[in-house]
Image (spheres, rainbow, N blue to C red):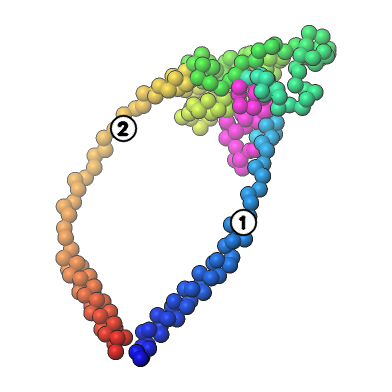
Amino acid sequence: MKATTKGDGGRSRLWQAACLGLLLILLVAPPALAQEPGPTPTEDRLAAPEMPAEPGQADLGAMVYYLVCMSCHGDRGQGLTDEWRSAWAEGDQNCWQPKCHGANHPQHGFELVRYVPPVVGESVMARYETAASLHAYISERMPWQDPGAQTEEEYWQVTAHILRANGIETGVEELGPENAAQVPVAAAARGEAPALPQPTALDLPPPHPTTTNWPVIAAALVALLALILAWAMWRRRQAR
């Protein structure tokens, strides 16, 4: 009968610990795996946009769009489509019903056109060469029922929001009359990359010649050899 060595005892205890750990995992894992995912939350398309802690110009423009523009131009900039109107309360889905926005609207109301165009899409942005021309159209013609009613700051904010919604980078921290004419819109909507300034070559110092640090390498090899010898001696003692 073969005697059990000290090394065999250590390995046996290691296997016992591993088996115990595996058993604990198997006991805990099934309840976690059996949990069913909860229902997917329904999107509230009429909810106000969430503002970051430090909103930028386009973020503030998203709120202006929500308050002034979204009811007609859509939550995704798609325009006044049947699909968008179906997201409203049932009694509000017909904008042109009597005494709402039809021809016989209330005294302080207004008649709404039947077609409200989208504000997101390549064909939409292709009509505006720069951010300045887009801003000019919005500030002069919108909102439909009261053109020019918003502040100048709000018009710049909603311009920045619409550009972002179309995936157009302005390249400036904040749009304004001093830089909007330099922000291309139509070209960006067509996917044409604007001409960027070429980087200036830097006068870098010549690279230092690489040298091999042989003393350090030799010391590392000696240390590695010493570790190998120590491990071999330990294995021999364990085998006795």
From the image, tell me which residue sits under label 2: 199
Label 1: state its secondary structure.
Answer: helix
Residue 205: name its quadrant.
top left
| Of the two numbered discs 1 and 2 in the rendering, the one whose residue sits closer to the viewer | 1
Residue at image location 59% in from the left, 61% down from the top: 30
Residue 85 belongs to the span the image colors magenta: no
The residue stretch that appears in magenta: 50-78
The residue at 47%/73% (across/down) is 18
Q: Residue furthest top?
A: 103
Task: Find residue 140 and name its label.
Answer: none
Magenta-span inclusion, residue 71: yes
Identify which residue is drawn at 19% across, 67% down.
217
Question: In which image quadrant can residue 191 be found?
Answer: top left
Q: Does residue 81 appear left or right of residue 8 in this picture?
A: right
Q: Is residue 209 left or right of residue 94?
A: left
Using the image, determine if residue 111 lies above or below residue 155. above
Q: Secondary structure at mark 2?
A: loop
Residue under numbered circle 1: 34
